[in-house]
Image (cartoon, rainbow, N blue to C red):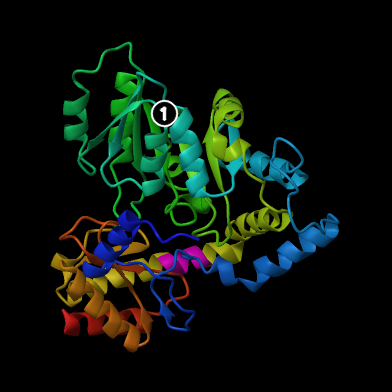
Amino acid sequence: MGGFPKKLKEKIQKRRVNDSFRALPSAHKLIDFSSNDYLGFSKNETIYANTFQRLLKNEKSENGATGSRLITGNHAYYKEIESLLVATFSYPSALVFNSGYDANIGFFSVVPQRNDIVFYDELVHASIRDGMKLGNAKSYKFKHNDLDDLAAKCKSVSDEIEVYVVTESVFSMDGDQPDLKALSAFCKKNKFNLVVDEAHALGVFGEGGVGMIQQLGLVKDVFAQIITYGKALGAHGAAVLGCNDLKDYLLNFAHSFIYTTGLPPHSLATILSATEYLNSTNGKKENQRLQSNISFFKNKVASLKMESFFIDSNSAIHACVIPGVNDVKKISKKLYLDGFDVKAIVSPTVPEGKERLRFCLHSYNTFEEIGWVLQLLKKYI
């Protein structure tokens, strides 16, 4: 085997020099302020047991899907989930993908067409950007949560051009939210197609944890809603919700759907069990505990007079901005040694100069844990 290409080696070395080199973390038992498991569903024993019983009841003993959904992998759980999604989210159709990344790659690479235009919030997830790069439409970013900037960029757009506007209901690195009502009204007025990624809102916002679009009553005005099961639902997989024509189009043209093996029965059974639990009394209690922890966290930040360090957020994600790779990593390491898992987020995931500690709150975090980690943070910054 030949030597590793020089250009690639140089890029890795540059990451090491900038102290932004990524490596897989080791397993640990630290107090969790990093995972996306907002409701603790990934470790929930009831969901685990219900999933097992569901598989036994339906005599589903297969380890894998055996093929893509269009060949042999479209087993009965898919129909059950997609029917449940239609009933729960009030969209005409739903299509399950293997992951949120697959859903965004599939959607944005094939739905916006050549000569169409996509306007996207500058802080949208990398999977959305990657999907747009694979497509043929022109794409332009607008300033984060800035409707005025979006409106200014849209002034020269011809009425004959198909336009897509893309945002997230909760941004993964900042934890903040756009004014979805105003954005929706703007798109409706201009006949633009609004697409909203709700990855970090599902299970956290809305009646029954359905997200912000349903909570605000915007279903009829949002062209597509993208949800993922790998965060608050503690499972794996994703779905695109929209009209029937959108589903038909995606299953005919989205490569990340067509050319991949389907999810195994166990993954889909877990989705069903987690969704059932979310709507149960115990699931609602987990959501209430999460909301209490969010309020407690914000109040504690205010009492410690650290608000200037934090990006304002009502979600489960709270970003403490500490510019400088070395500084933010140093504080993350100190918290690690104190027993807390709080990740330092650096460039290129966030812009240089906006490095931060990303606190993810959960229903299973205690007030004592939240209070102590923030007291330590105050000491270190």
For the residue carrying disc 1, how many other residues have a C-alpha within 10 Å: few (<14), some (14-19), or many (20+)?
Answer: some
Residue drawn where x is 24% and y is 84% of the image: 376
Q: Is residue 107 left or right of residue 298?
A: right
Image position of 66 (left or right of 221): right
Position of residue 5 relative to residue 41, above or below, is: above
Q: Quadrant of residue 15?
A: bottom left
| Residue 218 placement (x, y as % from top left) | 42, 34
Is residue 216 among what the camera can see? Answer: no
**x then y, percent, for residue 178:** 29, 44
Quarter of the image where one finds residue 167: top left
| In this picture, residue 170 sits left or right of residue 353 | right
Q: Name the residue under label 1.
A: 221
Instruction: List x then y, in percent, for residue 271.
Output: 63, 55
Residue range in magenta is 286-290
Residue 83, how many percent across, how many down? 67, 39
Q: Is residue 355 left or right of residue 55?
A: left
Prevalent SS, magenta region: helix
Element on which disc 1 rests: helix
Q: Nearer the viewer, residue 308 or 298?
A: 308
x 72%, y 69%: residue: 49
